[in-house]
């Protein structure tokens, strides 16, 4: 795990920098609060309604699609790493992954046919 | 790790952070000057020679500005959201090698902060954290433009994350490792004695997919739907002002620098310096030239990013999604498969 | 993606529509107008265009101004093409007064109108591109507009508020130093035009953003009262310069570009082509400029030369008769409607005269007001990003909306 220590130190440095900057701005900048100033900007008029609302379910749907495909891609990574080494044992590793991708593509075509990728 | 190692690491981090911040500031200046050049304007040229001190002037201006917080917004999230986007941006640079290892006082020092086993995965994992900063900031603003900007940003980033991840499968396959130094080392070959063995020449489709997906990931035009000034005023950072706004800006440009460095590493052989390496010269000059070559490749991509931004119009949400899911995703899958088959044939 | 019949409604879980305002202070509304947009996700359900944020009251003001005085207000109606407004109003007044202006005056007006049309189209194309994120094209054109404004400054003395026409003629002759830079502009401009043309016309993203967006067919466009590039984009070859020539437009040889689909791209393309045609007209006007005076020879209508006013009794009296309160030039009683082709479309003036020195009623028919009303129809069911593409392609000028 020792190779992660530099990452940790970098993270500390980065966070420190960010916090210092935010605190500096907090103390150096003026503070003149005003109810009109604090209204959310909506093209110069009073906001109509609120920005807390239930938006279209399509965005949720997209998130699910992402998770499905992203997991598939993560499966590909270990395969890609060992691919060259295992090729010496024969082409089985290639056929294996081709069948996996084929299954993935079937799922993809099904989604395409269902119109899951229509955003109009 | 003994104390000397820790000292070296801290020194490296301090230097790298300094360079990264300067690079981001210079990129902001370069964007303004280059865009001015493209558009027949002058751009900022008054602060210091050729406007070189402009970023510093901007910093002082922004740090003394009043920071507004929307009345009905979520105060805590509003304040920490810029930090959430900036800190991962810093962390990303940890695994990028910017030169061969050097030897100082008998100690070998790798020109990389941390050589992680999962280097590339680490980049994708940390890189995708940045979107939280955007979405949370957008949500906490309690502003409708911001919310739409945040929704667009998240939809766009997760869509292109797929093509981004898939397009490098071929690179990993050839290198047989996720460590970035290994990927660089693999490209250290010469074909026919003149063509460098860079991935750009052997996987051009992967290169194009990767670069375009990076454009989308960094929210740059033509993919800057999340800020889309003419539609959403300023998108997710509409309500941000002063230093918090500039943290968003800083994160955007640090990401830009790192994205360019990543493209150079994965596809242009990193710090590999073709042709000249064979000329006999002192080791330290060679290493300096290698770091320089890495920097030049990075700068080339930074300039490309800027150039594209000031040339093209912006995509529309549905076009962007259709491009990501219907064109890039299948292309990236096919590219990975074709690479696999070609590698199998060669072996 | 989900069939609407199979969709089951769970109480409290439906998507909420959200209303966002575009304008009055918004980067995409050049001028102060407001679109109230109801959104479901990114899809536009309803658009309500509001006006009244830039009410100027020009029509009412006109009732207390003399005819020549109103010319200064006409500058401020469509602030992108003040010269066209000046000329449109002057022609309307001359119709009311029954004046026939000199041939040279007509040619000078054509020349200035076409240069002004180019300036207007440069901005409207530029801002339409800017709204789609293409900043550079906008600035390329804006620089050329600066050159045109320099020309206007030489001719009229000011850049924006030109007030160049007078009833029966022009404010002054075209100065000699106008011609050289004008010719230079006509020669140099096409290269910049070509640059922007390469940046936009066949750009995939630009085409994707404007093709089949904001479609209106020819018949519907006529029913809505669209005019100008918005009407011609829908394939209706209606241009007042050709169909009811005024100011000697019949002497000039030019084409009227028309689109075929009536979408935002066609409106862009028509404007681009019109710039080319305007260049041709301006070149002809410059070459064939007749000799003589720009003003008619009638001291009751045209102000005498200032030098003569100081030296001659008769000219001094004429000067007073025109400029003093309760005096001034008086048209016969009656009412007229006269229209000209302004860059945005048909600019009409309806003037009712009671024989006094100011209009009893002046009504302006601004092209932007009619063009504005098609927005809800065009945007229904489209996406939020389309709203800026359509708004930019219609080129709504707020100064014209509320006179």
Image (cartoon, coloured by chain):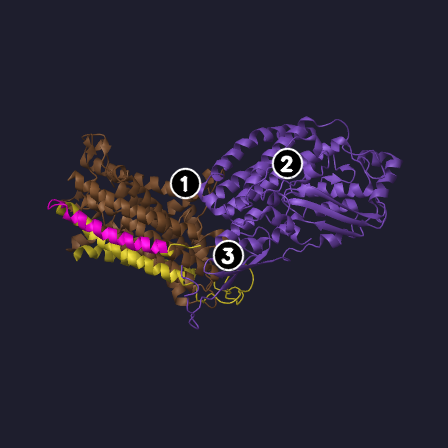
Q: Which residues are magenta?
A: A87-113
Q: Give the chain coloured yellow.
A: A
**For residue C180: magenta?**
no
Residues tagged by mark 1 and mark 2 found on one chain of the structure = no
* In the image, farthest residue toward the bottom: C11
Q: Say which residue appears at 84% left-offset and 45% top-offset.
A: C331
* In the image, farthest residue toward the left: A89
Q: Chain of mark 3?
A: C
Question: Up-down: is A51 above or below B104?
Answer: below
Q: CA distance from mark 3 to mark 1?
A: 34 Å
Q: Which residue is mark 1?
A: B307
Q: Chain of mark 2?
A: C
Kindly identify which numbered label has been placed on residue C173.
Answer: none
Q: Which residue is mark 3?
A: C381
Kindly identify which numbered label has been placed on residue C115.
Answer: 2
- Residue B270 rendering spot, x and y as whole percentages: 25, 41
In the image: residue C396, left or right of residue C250:
left
Question: Up-down: is C44 above or below C124?
Answer: below
Q: Give the chain coloured purple.
A: C
Q: CA distance from mark 2 to mark 3?
A: 38 Å
- Residue C217 rendering spot, x and y as whole percentages: 58, 47
């Amino acid at each position: 795990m020792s190779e992660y220590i530099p990452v940790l130190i970098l993270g500390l440095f980065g966070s420190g920098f960010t916090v210092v900057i935010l605190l500096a701005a907090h103390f150096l900048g003026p503070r003149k609060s005003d109810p009109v100033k604090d209204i959310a900007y909506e093209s110069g008029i009073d906001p109509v309604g609120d920005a807390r609302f239930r938006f279209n379910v399509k965005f949720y749907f997209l998130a699910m699609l992402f998770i499905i495909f992203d997991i598939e891609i993560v499966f590909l990574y270990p395969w890609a790493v060992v691919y060259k080494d295992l090729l010496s044992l024969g082409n089985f590793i290639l056929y294996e992954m081709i069948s996996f991708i084929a299954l993935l593509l079937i799922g993809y075509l099904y989604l395409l046919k269902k119109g899951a990728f229509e955003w109009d | 790790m003994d104390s000397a190692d820790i000292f070296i690491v801290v020194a490296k981090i301090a230097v790298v952070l300094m360079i990264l911040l300067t690079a981001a500031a210079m990129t902001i200046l370069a964007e303004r000057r280059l865009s001015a050049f493209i558009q027949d304007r002058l751009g900022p040229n008054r602060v210091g020679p050729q406007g070189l001190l402009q970023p510093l002037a901007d910093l002082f201006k922004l740090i003394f500005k009043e920071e507004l917080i929307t009345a009905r917004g979520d105060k805590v999230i509003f304040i920490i959201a810029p930090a959430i986007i900036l800190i991962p941006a810093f962390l990303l640079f940890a695994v990028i090698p910017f030169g061969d290892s050097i030897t100082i006082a008998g100690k070998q020092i790798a020109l990389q902060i941390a050589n992680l086993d999962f280097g590339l995965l680490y980049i994708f994992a940390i890189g995708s954290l940045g979107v939280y900063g955007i979405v949370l900031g957008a949500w906490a603003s309690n502003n409708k433009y911001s919310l739409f900007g945040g929704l667009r940003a998240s939809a766009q980033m997760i869509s292109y994350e797929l093509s981004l991840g898939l397009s490098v499968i071929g690179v990993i396959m050839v290198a047989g490792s996720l460590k970035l130094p290994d990927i660089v080392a693999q490209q250290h070959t010469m074909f026919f004695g003149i063509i460098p063995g860079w991935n750009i020449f052997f996987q051009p489709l992967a290169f194009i997919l990767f670069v375009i997906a990076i454009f989308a990931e960094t929210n740059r035009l033509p993919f800057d739907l999340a800020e889309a000034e003419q539609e959403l005023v300023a998108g997710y950072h509409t309500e941000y002002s002063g230093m918090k706004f500039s943290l968003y800006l800083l994160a955007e440009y640090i990401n830009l620098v790192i994205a360019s460095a990543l493209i150079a590493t994965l596809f242009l052989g990193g710090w590999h310096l073709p042709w000249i390496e064979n000329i006999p010269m002192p080791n330290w000059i060679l290493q300096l030239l290698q770091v320089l070559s890495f920097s030049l490749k990075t700068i080339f991509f930074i300039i490309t990013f800027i150039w594209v931004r000031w040339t093209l119009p912006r995509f529309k949400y549905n076009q962007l999604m259709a491009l990501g899911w219907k064109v890039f995703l299948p292309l990236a899958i096919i590219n990975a498969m074709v690479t696999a088959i070609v590698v199998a044939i060669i072996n | 993606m989900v069939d609407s019949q199979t969709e089951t409604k769970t109480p409290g879980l439906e998507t909420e529509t959200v209303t966002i305002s575009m304008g009055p202070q918004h980067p995409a509304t050049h001028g102060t107008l407001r679109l109230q947009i109801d959104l479901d996700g990114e899809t536009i359900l309803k658009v309500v265009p509001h006006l009244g944020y830039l009410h100027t009251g020009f029509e009412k003001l006109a009732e207390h101004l003399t005819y020549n005085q109103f010319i200064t207000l006409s500058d401020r109606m469509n602030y992108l093409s003040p010269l066209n407004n000046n000329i449109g109003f002057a022609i309307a007044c001359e119709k009311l007064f029954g004046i026939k202006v000199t041939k040279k005056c007509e040619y000078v007006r054509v020349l200035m109108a076409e240069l002004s049309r180019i300036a207007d189209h440069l901005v409207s194309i530029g801002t339409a591109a800017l709204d789609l994120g293409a900043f550079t094209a906008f600035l390329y054109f804006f620089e050329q507009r600066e050159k045109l404004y320099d020309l206007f400054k030489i001719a009229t003395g000011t850049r924006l508020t030109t007030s160049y026409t007078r009833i029966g003629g022009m404010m002054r002759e075209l100065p000699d130093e106008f011609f050289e830079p004008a010719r230079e502009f006509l020669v140099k401009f096409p290269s910049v035009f070509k640059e922007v043309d390469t940046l936009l016309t066949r750009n995939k993203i630009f085409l994707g953003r404007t093709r089949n967006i904001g479609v209106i067919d020819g018949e519907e466009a006529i029913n809505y009262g669209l005019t100008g590039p918005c009407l011609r984009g829908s394939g209706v070859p209606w241009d007042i310069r050709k169909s009811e020539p005024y100011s000697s437009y019949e002497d000039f040889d030019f084409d009227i570009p028309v689109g075929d689909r009536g979408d935002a791209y066609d409106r862009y393309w028509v404007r681009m082509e019109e710039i080319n045609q305007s260049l041709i007209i301006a070149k002809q006007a410059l070459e064939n400029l007749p000799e003589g005076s720009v003003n008619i020879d009638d001291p009751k209508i045209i102000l005498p030369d200032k030098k003569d006013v100081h030296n001659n009794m008769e000219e001094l009296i004429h000067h007073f008769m025109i400029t003093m309160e309760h005096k001034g030039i008086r048209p016969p009683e009656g009412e007229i409607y006269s229209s000209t082709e302004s860059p945005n479309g048909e600019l009409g003036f309806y003037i009712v005269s009671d024989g006094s020195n100011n209009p009893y009623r002046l009504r302006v028919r601004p092209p932007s007001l009619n063009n504005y009303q098609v927005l809800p129809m065009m945007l229904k069911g489209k996406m939020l990003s389309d709203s800026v593409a359509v708004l930019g392609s219609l080129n709504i000028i707020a100064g014209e909306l509320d006179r």
